[in-house]
Amino acid sequence: MSRFGITSSKIEAKLNRYVDVTQKFGCAPTFPLTAVTLSRHPELIRKLGSRGVEFAVHGYIHTDYRSLSLETQIGHFKKAIDIFRNCQISFTGFRAPYLRRNGETVEALDKLDFAYDSSGTIWWDVVDKSKYPKQAWDDYERLLAFYEPRNAQGYLSLPRIIDGIIEIPVSIPDDEAMVDRLGITDGKEIARIWEMIFRRTYARGELVTLQLHHERISLCESALETILQQAREMDPPVWIATLGEIAEWCKERHGFTFDVNSQGNGQYRVKANCSGRATLLLRNCKVNRPTAEWSGGYQSIDATDFLIESPTRPFVGVGPNSSPYAINFLKSEGFIVEESDQPDNYGIYLANLADFQEADEKLISEAIERSNAPLLRYWRWPDKAKSALAITGDIDSITLMDFVMRVFEVWRQNGR
Ligand SMILES: [Zn+2]
């Protein structure tokens, strides 16, 4: 409670300090915002919006939506949409309070045409248990159990299109886990932990969505600067984007296709049907247009109409009994996928994809990268970026009154 004041000035200063940092690095954060809080402070939020901040819906009230029915959630989200519209605050996505949702949450969001949901979590094993007292570690583990994250060791940290809505995972540990649970008060240690996550996502070509709440900006400001500074120095670059931009890109990229015609003698005429932002990559084949070294043995090519020469078909070959889920996954990774019973035609051929599950995605993706197969693909990110970074943090309360009201609103909700 000490973080809040009677007026909004204390929190407003922190929010502005946060945006000062992101502006310095030419990017903007996404702040999921509880609708009732917005209704009490529309001017303050509009001012942040004019500084480039993007907003998302963070519940109508700050409650645990995992325990609520579809009808109740639809009712809440409709009320939230009305408040955002009345206050003229634009949004395209959602993040659940406490990062907790159920299947109905996604269904409700889909029905109400939200573009994305960023409530799922992915956990990175980057904290050294031996450095912390048992009590702090137990607190940390309880928080992890509460979030039910995927483990980054076995899963890809990527946005994905599920039933028409784009899911953008949040990387854990966040500021709350580090500061409130593990008791870290050294900004350098926070920077070191986030840096490890950032480095891993860069090496893997994935996304890190950091969660940093404005309440802890004083303690985490230098860590945020460290990560943004590093991200700006990488080559190939890191795409620093808002959640809305990531969702928009996913939709745009989903529409990209290739027309490939075999000309005989291992020659293929390729036409890439994509926007100018697409990152077009090829590997282990010859091409009749200029290319540039990219990363991981890939070359990037700017042309969208070219001729390639390759000893095997530059596609991912899959067995005839492959599940639609598996094929969709490989396509979502930007590959050209061909069902065939002729393994010898491909540099990489995956025979056993009948029971393919999400838990197999990372293994398959790594096996493809490790192979020396000639390949043509769209990369995951726009403008030749290797990985992506989003800065986010929710706004639950702005004044002490909001904080008190938040408790009351949830109590009233649960009492019904
Ligand atoms: Zn929240």
Image (cartoon, rainbow, N blue to C red):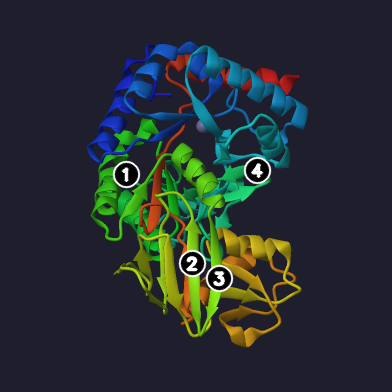
Q: Are marks 1 and 2 in contact (CB under 8 Å)?
A: no
Q: Is residue 329 above or below residue 101?
A: below
Establish whether ligand 1 lies closer than 8 Å to the Cβ of label 1.
no
The three-letter amino acid code for the residue at tag 3 is Asn
Residue 83 vs residue 189, the one in the foreground: 83
- Name the residue that disc number 1 marks: 185
Labelled disc at residue 164: 4
Q: Secondary structure at mark 3?
A: strand
Q: How many C-alpha atoms fall within 10 Å of the one at disc 2: few (<14), some, or many (≥20)?
A: some
Say which of marks 4 and 3 sits in front.
Answer: 3
Whether residue 374 can be seen here? yes
Residue at 46% x, 40% y: name it.
243
Say which of marks 1 and 4 sits in front.
Answer: 4
Residue at 59% x, 21% y: name it.
81
Q: Between marks 1 and 2, how big is the CA–CA gap?
A: 55 Å
Where residue 150 sits: x, y (%)? 58, 56
Q: Are marks 3 and 2 in contact (CB under 8 Å)?
A: no
- Name the residue that disc number 2 marks: 270
In the image, taking residue 385 as reference, residue 149 lies left or right, namely right
Dot 1 or dot 2: first in sequence order is: 1
Where residue 287 sits: x, y (%)? 38, 74
The three-letter amino acid code for the residue at tag 1 is Thr
Dot 2 or dot 4: first in sequence order is: 4
Dot 3 or dot 2: first in sequence order is: 3
Where residue 100 sits: x, y (%)? 61, 40
Say which of marks 1 and 2 sits in front.
Answer: 2
